[in-house]
Amino acid sequence: MLTPEEVKALAELGSATVYEASGREGLVPLSFLRFPPGVKAAGPAFPVLCAPGDNLGAHAAMAALKPGEVLLLAQAAAEPVALVGELLATQAKAQGAAAILVDGAVRDADELAVLGLPVWARWVSPKGAKRERLLGLGVPVFLGGVEVRLGDYLVLDGDGVVVVPRERAREVLQKARERAEREGRLRERFAGGELSLDLYGLRERVAEHLAQAARLREEGGHG
């Protein structure tokens, strides 16, 4: 289990760096809206399997959620029905949730944007959910075909969502840190005028196209 400082580092490194560091595994192939814009989050998942269009699981989760966890609300078949609104999000914040991830819709979008709890959702809709059935608390769920188990780490930001298996969390974090350090050194060299074509050894692959572009530029300049 990662320490709070290590979880914070995962969030700061971001989904793209963590995804690459994990061997390009765990990317959730879905698009999410983010409230408020610009937030990042990470934490162990508390997955909830909701019946389609039903948020009884979201209400039940408030009694089981632990501080620092990312509440993941999945549906057996995703529907654009609001599983979370301002009142549930307020409860999750009070319970210490790191974030909420909804494979469905949210509502009260304006209120969520200022609440202070990071929220990711597939859709926004005023359509409310039923409160009739719960399929599972803390059980494995699938998000865009990617399995998420209790305690697996979620990394969420503007690029998307990445799942890191709990068994690999520290390994992936270390590799992500190393990758970020390499990118930091490259950033300095690029800022100084060097080109990725040269640093990555790609110039030979595009030499013919560069020569063609130079000829076209020269011909156009004489026209």
Image: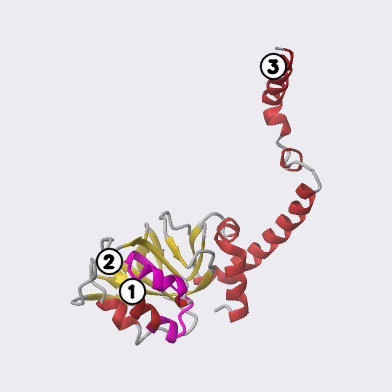
| Relative horizontal placement of residue 204, taking residue 66 as reference (left or right) | right
> At label 3, which amino acid type do we have?
Gly
Q: In the rendered structure, which disc, 2 or 1, sits on the residue that comes first in sequence? A: 1
- Please, what secondary structure does the residue beneath circle 1 have? loop
User: In the rendered image, which residue does mark 2 sit on?
Assistant: 126
- The label shown at residue 220 is 3
Residue at image position (44%, 70%) is 113
Q: How is the image coloured?
A: secondary structure
Circle 1/circle 3 CB separation < 8 Å: no
Tag count = 3
Q: In the rendered structure, which segment of residues is drawn in magenta?
A: 91-114
The location of residue 109, given as percent across then percent down, is 38, 68
Q: Check the image and report above or below for 43 versus 104.
A: below
Q: Which mark is residue 85?
A: 1
Residue sitting nearer the eye, 125 or 142: 125
Residue 117 lies, with reference to residue 213, above or below; the image says: below
Spot the residue most to the left. 132
User: How many angstroms separate mark 2 from mark 1 (CA)?
Assistant: 9 Å
Q: Position of residue 194 (x, y in %)?
A: 79, 43
